[in-house]
Image (spheres, helix red, strand yellow):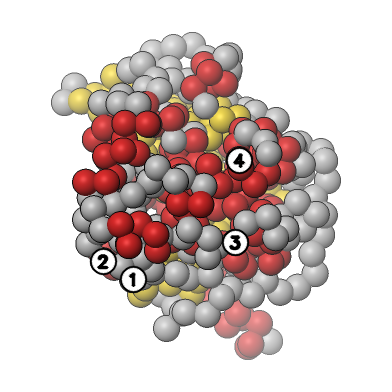
Amino acid sequence: MFLKPILFLGAVSFVSLLPTSLIAAEQSDYSPLADSFKQRFHQQLKTSKVPGGAFVIVEGDKVLKLSTYGKRTKGGSLNVNADTVFRLASVSKTFAGTLASMLVNEKKLNWQQPIKSYLPEFTLADKQKAQQINLGHIIGQSTGLMPNSYDNLINANVGMERIINKFSELTPMCSPGVCYSYQNVAFSFIQDAIEQQSGQSYESLLQNKIFSPLDMKSASIGYDAFDQQSNRAEPHVKTKSGFRKVKVKPNYYKLAPAAGVNASITDMSKWLIANLGENPGVLSNSVIKDVTTPGVRTTKELRRRDWRTYLDNAHYGKGWRVYEFEGRPLIYHAGWVAGYVAEVSYSPELNIGMAMLLNGESRVIAKLSSAFWRDTFKRADVLASNTSAN
């Protein structure tokens, strides 16, 4: 059973400040697989009538394949390109977990600190349980609260101050740290701790510590930043008559750590490369190990359509999911918000990562990603077998 922290081995290289989309990989053992994935990606998005999308596959500090598909708006004339900005939805949590871990690494935060130290107005019906919830529980989805507590109020555009006060009515379903309970509102409480300890706004700190150092030129936080992007993908929801363009909903932008990041597929290539350990000056191996150490077990993930055939185990780390994919570690997170879906995943063993961004709500993304990793790990087995035979 895969329960140990993931170790990142081998030499570490520093990524050039050239745009990642221009750093072409030399012929790789996985290049044929990347080529076939491109064909499948375009074919399945066309079959599913998704308006537009993009994907990237990286190996080490190189881009194996980056490709875009379709239009920024259904029926429009502008194509999705490598710099088209999408909403990342819950993939934003990977940035929040990393940013918090950076501050823990710098001794500015401690995972054991109670969240009430930074958000004194937060309480529960069981006040003792409220005192026990710490930063590690917040970022590790193990608060013990009912899953998705008060997401309905975010959807109803209720103000955060009123929502926080509503937590006093909740009785936890388990003690903190014992069970998995996915949150958006409570997860975003980490923003208060980050801002109070750093003396900077969440947006500024994310820009200064991650976006700018990784040269993620299109990445941003929040509704206003997304609205000001001229090269952005518009949201589409699926109806009985096909995909329909809708307005961007600002509600979940209130939860910057949980769902506030916007980025292009070029930006995501740089994020993946950093998480593979190839830019230690920005994202250290100690931070990577911290956020990908398995925490609470997430049995619900084992029942996911398209994934359940392959998953032996699943946990939540700190802003990242940690899967055991047919015995191999796979670091993963998905996002879904009105009109957009996103996925990012990587294998620390193979030093390969993949991200996809779509501007239409479609489950095709899960079908594509699970099949990609099935084929990638099979390819690794073939290569290892050939090496042994020689």
Residue 46 in which image quadrant: top left
Real-space Cα distance between discs 4 and 2?
29 Å
Real-space Cα distance between discs 1 and 3?
19 Å
Given the image, on which type of amino acid does mark 3 rest? Asn
Res 237 visible: no
Q: Earlier in the sequence, mark 1 or mark 4?
A: 1
Q: Is residue 148 above or below residue 108?
A: above
Say which of 312 and 34 sits in front: 312
Q: Is residue 124 left or right of 11 when viewed as pictured?
A: left
Q: Which residue is mark 4?
A: 195
Q: Are marks 1 and 4 in contact (CB under 8 Å)?
A: no
Given the image, on which type of amino acid does mark 1 rest? Val
For discs 1 and 4, the disc positioned in front in the rendered view: 4
Q: Secondary structure at mark 4?
A: helix
Residue at x-position 83% and y-position 46%: 16
Real-space Cα distance between discs 1 and 4?
28 Å
Q: Which mark is residue 110?
A: 3
Say which of 134 and 31 sits in front: 134
For discs 1 and 3, the disc positioned in front in the rendered view: 3
Q: Are marks 3 and 4 in contact (CB under 8 Å)?
A: no
Residue 89 in which image quadrant: top left
Residue at x-position 38% and y-position 68%: 177
Q: Which mark is residue 174?
A: 2
